[in-house]
Amino acid sequence: MATNPQVLLIMGSESDLPVMQEAVDVLCNFGVAYEMRISSAHRSPVRTTALASEAANRGIKVIIAGAGMAAHLAGVVAAKTILPVIGIPMPGGALNGVDALYSTVQMPAGIPVGSMAIGKAGAKNAGLFAVQILALGDERLSSALQAFRAEMDRDVEQRDLALQAS
Ligand code: RP5
């Protein structure tokens, strides 16, 4: 477990780990210290609310919450902290993540959750969005994000050049 984590990732179940790993990989690539926990809004509600309400005092700056099905985790976490909470709707279940998307994105007014897309793309963007928030006060992260964007741009150009040459 990292000392002085800046990002707290919470997932509702261990079954969410393969998707959450995408967010972790981004944080690792940008050298952002994180802590990852399993805690469910319905199976372990007391632990979940404690994790959320204690996060700011522990130096956490951003929380990423991933859950599937009737995904109330991000909303419950957001209700217990004023830190920005980024939600990742998990795929799976009978509706393959559409239920989790609606549950995460359709927060009633007053308690915002920044919802990402369903699944791995959403998890990757959650990691990037957390880095962007941290970059507001961190020149190193700001420069690293600029370099990341430039690299994506170069990659698209190279793929296009290869296509034209084929
Ligand atoms: C949610 O229910 C979890 O976030 C997970 O996405 C989904 C299924 O959980 P398991 O039954 O696999 O533990 O709470």
Image (spheres, helix red, strand yellow):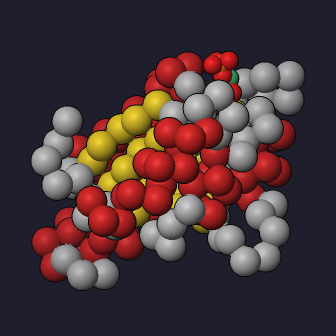
Relative side of 28 to 42, left or right: left
Q: Quadrant of the C terminus?
A: top left
Residue at the spot 85% in from the left edge and 29% down from the top edge: 95
**Residue 121 at what x, y percent from top left?**
55, 44
Give the left or right position of residue 59, taking residue 132 as reference: left
Residue 71 falls in image quadrant: top right
- Where on the image, by quarter, is ligand 1? top right
Q: Is residue 101 toward the left or the right of residue 95 in the image?
A: left
Q: Quadrant of residue 78?
A: bottom right
Count of marks, rendered view: 0
State the residue lying farthest toward the front: 46
Q: Is residue 110 visible?
A: yes
> Between 94 and 74, which is closer to the camera in this rendering?
74
- Residue 53 lies, in percent from the top left, at 46, 59
**Residue drawn where x is 47% and y is 31% of the image:** 38
Where does residue 104 sit, x and y in percent of width and height? Answer: 72, 53
Q: Residue at x 59, y 32 (%)?
A: 44
Corner quadrant of residue 2: top left
Observer-nearest residue: 151 or 12?
12
Question: Along the line of sight, which residue is nearer the eye, 166 or 31?
Answer: 31
Seen in the picture, residue 63 relative to 120 is either above or below; the reply is: below
Q: Quadrant of the N terminus?
A: top left
Residue 137 horizontal side relative to residue 47, left or right: left
Inspect this view and state whether residue 160 appears: no
145 up-or-down from 11: above or below: below
Residue at the location (57% across, 55% down)? 77
x and y, in percent, of residue 74 in the image: 62, 52
